[in-house]
Amino acid sequence: MDTVSKGSIKAQLVSTSCCKAHWIISFSQFGECINAELSGNTLWYTREIFAEVLDSIEFRINDGVPPIDEMKGHMWLPEHLMKQQEFCRSAEWVWGVLWLYTHIGYIENFSTAGISLGQLLELLVDKQLEALIYVGMGRLHIENELSHSLCSGCISFNMQFISISR
């Protein structure tokens, strides 16, 4: 197994065709970038640069770990998330990927901003919900039909999570 020096893994909040505030994983090393996105029950990889990143949480890759092309092979794909398509599960999935990478030693225990894994899931959900509320030109005009303006599934997931955990 080849090993390399530091790069980073970022949780990035982006707008996609199916969700206005969707978390992805972005691997970055030696000027190369690979994005991983769980959409529905499919994991997509792309080298596309997103025009607008709404928010980002960065973790440094530890020395002595495989290159990013190999790291992506250890992506967390739990069966319960792969079966459920009725609402966006990107925050839960991104947290799971970062948790796994921390526990197998691929990334540091805290983000570059000092965020721990214990704080991460709540922060991902909060930032996603904020972005859904404020997406667009500063403020979103919430209409009766949320599905025209937002990923209503993201709102359903976030409201369920908040009501259960708080």
Image (cartoon, rainbow, N blue to C red):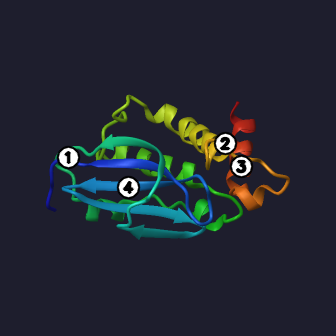
Distance CA(mark 4)–CA(mark 2) = 27 Å
Amino acid at the residue labelled 3:
Ile
Q: Residue at x 33, y 34 (%)?
A: 112
Residue 48 falls in image quadrant: bottom left
Residue behind mark 1: 6
Q: Earlier in the sequence, mark 3 or mark 2?
A: 2
Distance CA(mark 1)–CA(mark 4) = 14 Å
Q: Earlier in the sequence, mark 1 or mark 4?
A: 1
> Counting other residues with Cα less than 10 Å from the Cα at mark 2, is it few (<14), some (14-19), or many (20 or more)?
few
Q: Nearer the viewer, mark 1 or mark 2?
A: 2
Q: Is residue 103 above or below residue 75?
A: above
Furthest toward the right, the residue is 144
Q: Earlier in the sequence, mark 1 or mark 2?
A: 1
Q: Is residue 51 left or right of residue 137?
A: left
CB under 8 Å between callouts 3 and 1?
A: no
Residue 103, given in percent of the width and then of the height, sits at 36, 43
Q: Earlier in the sequence, mark 3 or mark 1?
A: 1
Residue behind mark 2: 139
Residue behind mark 3: 155
